[in-house]
Image: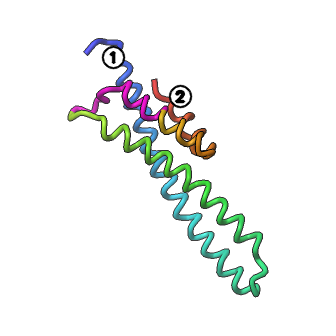
Amino acid sequence: MKPAELTKQEQALSTFEELEREMTFLNDKVGSLGWKQRDELIRHVYSNYNNHEGLNIARSEWKTELTKLNAVSWLYKIFSENRDLFGYFENYDKIMNEIDELIECAASMEKYEIASTLLAWKKKFP
């Protein structure tokens, strides 16, 4: 492997590891926001169904973080499926094309939050 390609692979691996950490963080956050949503629902019931605002805020926060987690999970899956036995990313251009297709698909479906999350992560890879 050429030195330039090796450097690119090392940078990609570093960013991939950051992606793993982010996925773990978001998974924990979605879980805690799920519990928060549950607590708000209980408050809503005990308030004779007058706590709409608190429940809607909790649902919105949970949905936002879940959307980010799903986008990061898609990226993680794409990169994981294209790693070889030694941990290098085979067909790096193919990976980037798949990410571009996901971004275009999300934008065409007007899922701009997903598209922006995918684009932000794509920019981190070399």
Given the image, on which type of amino acid does mark 1 rest? Glu
Q: Residue at x 28, y 12 (%)?
A: 2
Task: Tell which of 80 and 28 is nearer to you.
Answer: 80
Q: Position of residue 103 (x, y in %)?
A: 53, 37
Q: Residue at x 57, y 70 (%)?
A: 35
Assign the magenta stretch its main secondary structure.
helix
Q: Is residue 81 above or below residue 25?
A: above
- Please give the range of residues in magenta: 86-100
Q: Residue at x 55, y 58 (%)?
A: 29
Q: Residue at x 50, y 46 (%)?
A: 71
Image quarter of the N terminus: top left
Image quarter of the C terminus: top left
| Residue at the spot of label 1 | 5
Q: Report the side of 74 relative to 107 (left or right).
A: left
Task: Tell which of 91 and 35 is nearer to you.
Answer: 91
Magenta stretch: includes residue 39: no
Q: Report the side of 80 relative to 122 (left or right).
A: left
Q: Position of residue 34 (x, y in %)?
A: 56, 67
Which element carries disc 2, helix, strand or loop?
helix
| Residue at the spot of label 2 | 123
Task: Tell which of 97 and 69 is nearer to you.
Answer: 97
Q: Is residue 110 above or below residue 119?
A: below
Instruction: Please tell me in which quadrant of the rendered image residue 20 appears.
Output: top left
Q: Is residue 18 above or below residue 68?
A: above
Given the image, on which type of amino acid does mark 2 rest? Lys
